[in-house]
């Protein structure tokens, strides 16, 4: 049996590939364009493993995707590939429209053609799982109830709008063509291999480098945080037992203001790798201009996946964040390579051209 994973060299995708291959012998075809966010070093432990077949390419390249589907006949597709950083979407939304909307559309078209030609058994067993975000639901007030799967879509950034559009396309392909889809909307992930442009890894990396810890606005924006491996187990569970056409919210029951997150990271670093001058890392916190259109609060009601599929997160925030900080302390070379662009040089050598900037 084979699964096609898209975006499997990124943060969540690479954790998913590693977790899947540690738990099953199913072959994974990993289609990833290796943008700045894709990093094959995340998958270095799989070198020589015949169960992992990496293909560098764009989900929007219909001919490439059609060829991969014909050749490998996957029983399922898990679509992680996307532009994922809100701040980048504010500076330049074009790539987000291209990959998250047009790319997903092209992928769906290729999958529809492939699925339509399968025999009845393969057709019935096939799944297309689309990985999405809680940001499509917009922003909550302090006392509003958490997002359920029926919450209205109200995306506020070019990133969330592009993800919302892709969710709608996936839904439409189920209702119109009967494509067997599943959609998951998850809250903020954290853990190993997280690119240090996002809040938690940026704080860990900047703190150690003696740089400022930039907190947007008043730092009181609230996010729900989920350890990445819990997200991966939820996706596997939805793939295994999710009802076709259904949406599942995934979250960690861990709502925290950003400033608390930064303080927690600082306190862990004080304990695990104290500053040479003995002063607390929190002295490096610097309040900076807020993100335009910054959503104030996200919160996920994850009762449906718990009730229907028996999934619950394994990590508490306290255990997950400790593991995460420790992982960054144990992997300075990974951080150095990501920051120096060392992995990009390797990609250029291996594939002839570097990834998109
Ligand atoms: P990421 O930016 O770390 O990784 C994205 C991966 O997709 C990279 O490897 C990149 O090279 C690849 N990619 C980008 N454009 C591509 C294209 N056109 N064709 C093929 N590959 C392409 O992102 P992530 O944080 O791992 O997020 C993965 C998915 O999960 C995204 O769809 C994101 O919207 C969603 N999500 C993320 C979070 C989070 O907290 N990070 C939470 C909920 C949902
Ligand atoms: O909610 C799920 C989403 O979580 C995913 O869909 C996105 O792909 C993922 O990037 C993440 O989006 P956020 O915008 O919530 O994550 P980010 O790490 O960029 O920011 C988290 C919060 O921290 C947010 O309120 C902005 C703030 N922040 C972020 C950075 C990078 C800061 O205060 N300072 C910073 O330097």
Image (spheres, rainbow, N blue to C red):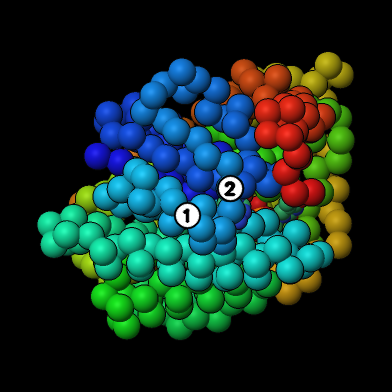
The Cα–Cα distance between marks 2 and 1, rounded to whole angstroms, is 9 Å
| Front residue (pair 81, 332) | 81
- For label 2, the residue is 57
Please provide percent x and percent y for residue 163: 55, 68
Label 2 sits on a secondary structure element that is loop
Query: Most extreme residue toward the left, as rendered?
Result: 121
Residue at (35, 67) in percent of width and height: 113
Label 1 lies in ligand 1 vicinity (Cβ under 8 Å): no
Label 2 lies in ligand 1 vicinity (Cβ under 8 Å): yes
Q: As displayed, is residue 160 above or below residue 237? A: below
Please provide percent x and percent y for residue 303: 29, 63
Q: Quadrant of residue 151?
A: bottom left
| Front residue (pair 91, 21) | 21
Q: As displayed, is residue 55 above or below residue 151? A: above
Residue at (45, 76) in percent of width and height: 169
Q: Quadrant of ligand 2?
A: bottom right
Label of residue 65 in the image: 1
Label of residue 193 in the image: none
Disc 1 crowd rating (10 Å Cα; few below 14, some 14-19, many 20+) is: many
Q: Is residue 191 visible?
A: no
Residue at (64, 43) in percent of width and height: 34
Q: Quadrant of residue 140?
A: bottom right
Quadrant where the N terminus sits is: top left
Labelled pair 2, 1 in contact (Cβ < 8 Å): yes
Label 1 sits on a secondary structure element that is helix
Residue at (86, 30) in percent of width and height: 210
């Amino acid at each position: 049996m084979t699964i096609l994973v898209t975006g499997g060299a990124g943060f969540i995708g690479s954790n998913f590939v590693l977790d899947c291959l540690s738990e099953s012998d199913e072959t994974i075809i990993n289609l990833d364009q290796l943008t700045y966010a894709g990093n094959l070093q995340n998958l270095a432990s799989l070198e020589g493993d015949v169960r992992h077949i990496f293909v560098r390419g764009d989900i929007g390249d219909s001919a490439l995707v059609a060829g991969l589907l014909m050749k490998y006949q996957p029983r399922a597709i898990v679509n992680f590939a996307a532009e994922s950083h809100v701040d980048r979407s504010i500076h330049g939304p074009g790539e987000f429209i291209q990959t998250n909307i047009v790319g997903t559309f092209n992928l769906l078209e290729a999958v529809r053609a492939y699925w339509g030609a399968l025999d009845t058994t393969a057709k019935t067993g096939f799944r297309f799982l689309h990985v999405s975000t809680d940001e499509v639901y917009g922003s909550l007030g302090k006392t509003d109830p958490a997002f359920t799967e029926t919450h209205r879509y109200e995306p506020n950034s070019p990133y969330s709008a592009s993800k919302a559009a892709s969710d709608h396309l996936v839904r439409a392909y189920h209702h119109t063509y009967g494509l067997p889809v599943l959609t998951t909307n998850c809250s903020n992930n954290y853990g190993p291999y997280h690119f240090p442009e996002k809040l938690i890894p940026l704080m860990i990396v900047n703190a150690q480098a003696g740089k400022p810890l930039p907190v947007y606005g008043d730092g009181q924006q609230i996010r729900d945080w989920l350890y990445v491996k819990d997200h991966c187990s939820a996706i596997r569970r939805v793939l295994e037992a999710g009802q076709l056409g259904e949406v599942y919210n995934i979250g960690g029951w861990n709502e925290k203001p950003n400033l608390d997150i930064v303080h927690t990271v600082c306190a862990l670093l004080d304990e695990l790798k104290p500053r040479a001058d003995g002063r607390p890392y929190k002295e490096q916190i610097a309040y900076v201009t807020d993100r335009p259109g910054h959503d104030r609060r996200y919160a996920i009601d994850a009762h449906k996946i718990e009730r229907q599929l028996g999934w619950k997160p394994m990590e508490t925030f306290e255990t997950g964040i400790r593991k995460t900080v420790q992982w960054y302390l144990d992997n300075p070379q990974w951080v150095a390579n990501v920051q120096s662009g060392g992995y990009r040089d390797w990609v250029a050598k291996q594939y002839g051209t570097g990834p998109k900037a």
